[in-house]
Amino acid sequence: MIDNFISSQSSFLVVVVLLLALALVVFSADKLIDGAVIVSAELGIPRIVVGATVISLGTTLPELATSIVAVAQGSSDLAVGNATGSVITNTTLVLGAGALFGSIPVLRETASKLRIFTIVMILLIGLCLLDNGISSFSVGGLLPQWAGILLLAVVPVYLFMMFKGSSRLKTSHSSTSEDGAVADDDGRSKNICLIAVNVCVIIVFAALLAFGSDAVVSSASTLAARAGLSEVLIASTIIALGTSLPELVTTINAARKGRGDLAVGNVLGANILNMTLVLGYSATFNPGGVGIARDIFTTHFPVMVAIVAIFSYFVYNTKKHSISRIEGMGLVILYVVYLTSLII
């Protein structure tokens, strides 16, 4: 509905909508961060776990919404291109920009598990895309319906693993001090209302993030179409960037406030959910699975794998267990190179 409204407006009004939507995304992301930090503090849940679950679910809504619309319209290129493009954007532009605004610590206790999980999911997608064999490189590939069901089944498993891990960390911490455990229990009983209020804050502003991002994508796509750009280019650049705006703004705000651990959890969690929830939905609710265009299979997917590999290299080779500003700049430059290769 918002697409029809925006497309019927003049170019000037479309620009106004774009700016207002961007402001909504920035404001909502800031409130989402505050609510998540309060909840994690009151429950004793590590911030990186909150970032990888609650916030990531909220900031992945734009990709999921775009995927639902694309599947309904029979445009598998848009659904797959948006999901893979968002992973590329998250791992380069989003994480790199976050590092420019503050230190991005990488906690091995949780982040290492997330990295491994991300790599495993990408490999799984790669195996699914090889369903048509070598001919996929010339005629395109296919993500079967059974693979989509499997990906969706991974989502609750992933969330369970994250919360189970946080519970284990809480139990270990509480067992070190009997007095500390009692105080923790008392604190939770006295702040149930505070927790409930901030959970509602997270839900409300996650919804506003999704709405704002949808408006950004719609207005940007309308402007691009009027400028004569192709739909494939729009899906690979503007839509992928637009649906990654929540992750971008959330990560920058988290890093700026000295909460870089939350930023890492947000980026990695969003990548995992893009690979499982977004692509899983696309394939599951398409009777014959999701067709993968040749360009997406031969360009987007290999680039996505390469960038994730580079991200893992940064993590495992940093002596300070953090992503520096110089490395962040390198990631941003890498995104610019990728974007340029798509446009040229």
Image: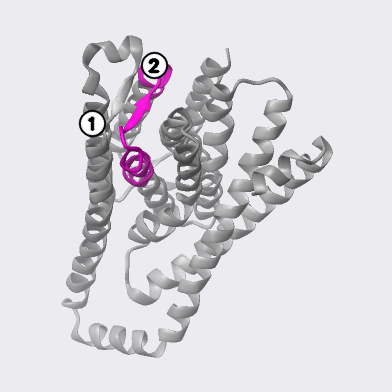
Dominant SS of magenta comes to helix
Above/below status of 227 relative to 30:
above
Give whichever of discs 1 and 2 has the lower sequence position: 1
Q: Which residue, given by chain and number where applicable, does mark 2 sit on?
A: 294
Magenta segment, which residues?
272-300
Mark 2: few/some/many CA within 10 Å (<14, 14-19, 20+): some
Magenta stretch: includes residue 288: yes
Which-is-in-front pick, marks 1 and 2? Answer: 2
Q: How many marks?
A: 2
Report the residue at 49% width, 56% height from top.
258
Mark 1: few/some/many CA within 10 Å (<14, 14-19, 20+): few
Of residue 87 and residue 312, the one placed in the foreground of this image is 87
For the C terminus, the quadrant is top right
Res 300 quadrant in image: top left
| Residue 32: x %, y % from top left | 52, 62
Camera sees residue 182: yes
Res 12 quadrant in image: top right
Above/below status of 26 relative to 188:
above
Amino acid type for the residue under numbered disc 2:
Arg
| Residue 192: x %, y % from top left | 40, 85
Q: Which residue, given by chain and number where applicable, does mark 1 sit on?
A: 123
Please, what secondary structure does the residue beneath circle 1 have?
helix
Camera sees residue 18: no
Magenta stretch: includes residue 166: no
| Residue 212: x %, y % from top left | 62, 52
Please, what secondary structure does the residue beneath circle 2 have?
helix
